[in-house]
Image (cartoon, rainbow, N blue to C red):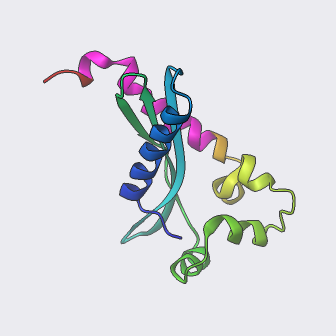
Amino acid sequence: MLIILEEGIEGVINRAKNARTKYSDADYYVGMEGYVDTNKYGMFLAGVVAIMDKHGEIGVGISAKMQLPMFIQKKIQDGEELGPLVKDLMNDTNGNIRQFDGTNGILSKGLYNRVDEFKDATNCALTRFQSPEFFNKK
């Protein structure tokens, strides 16, 4: 399944809202999703995070983007999902790729992994709460 940026943002907001429904006494609720951004230069892999506070304010952050190799792009365009595709390519029977490295960790040989991706997106999403004086200006 190919998730584009707008769908990714909608998905993480829904995940944060669902977390709020399930854990109503928390201060913050988080949704995370990987997505593929396609443009005339190819497909780029990134992560998006939504953080919702207990008042319903939402901050959204997006990680850096990494270009996918052409053979992976073609397989995605043919309907394959990225996670299982890379898991098969790397013969990852333990699920290590999904938990830590991610596709970007494999492609960059550890320069930028899944943890980095979601850390960056989370830090960007927190901007709304770090600088409310800018986001609440009319």
The residue at the far bottom in this view is 78
Q: Residue at x 56, y 66 (%)?
A: 68
Depicted 29 relative to depicted 110: above or below: above
Q: Name the foreground residue: 138 vs 19.
A: 19
Q: Is residue 108 left or right of residue 67?
A: right
Q: Residue at x 66, y 58 (%)?
A: 103
**Which x, y percent locates residue 31?**
51, 41
The residue at the far top in this view is 133
**Which x, y percent locates residue 94?**
86, 57
Residue 112, can we see it?
no
**Does 124 lie within the magenta span?**
yes
Q: Toward which corner of the image does residue 8 lie, by quadrant? A: bottom left
The residue at the far right in this view is 93
Instruction: Report how many numbered discs are placed on residues in the image.
Output: 0
Q: Toward which corner of the image does residue 98 lie, by quadrant? A: bottom right
Q: Is residue 132 left or right of residue 48?
A: left
Depicted 120 relative to depicted 67: above or below: above
The stretch of residues the image draws in magenta is: 116-134
Q: Residue at x 56, y 29 (%)?
A: 23
**Which x, y percent locates residue 7?**
40, 58
Residue 66, can we see it?
yes
Q: Tell me the quarter of the image containing the C terminus.
A: top left
Depicted 120 relative to depicted 39: above or below: above
**Which x, y percent locates residue 70?**
56, 76
Predominant secondary structure in magenta? helix
Q: Name the foreground residue: 10 vs 88.
A: 10
Q: Residue at x 50, y 58 (%)?
A: 35
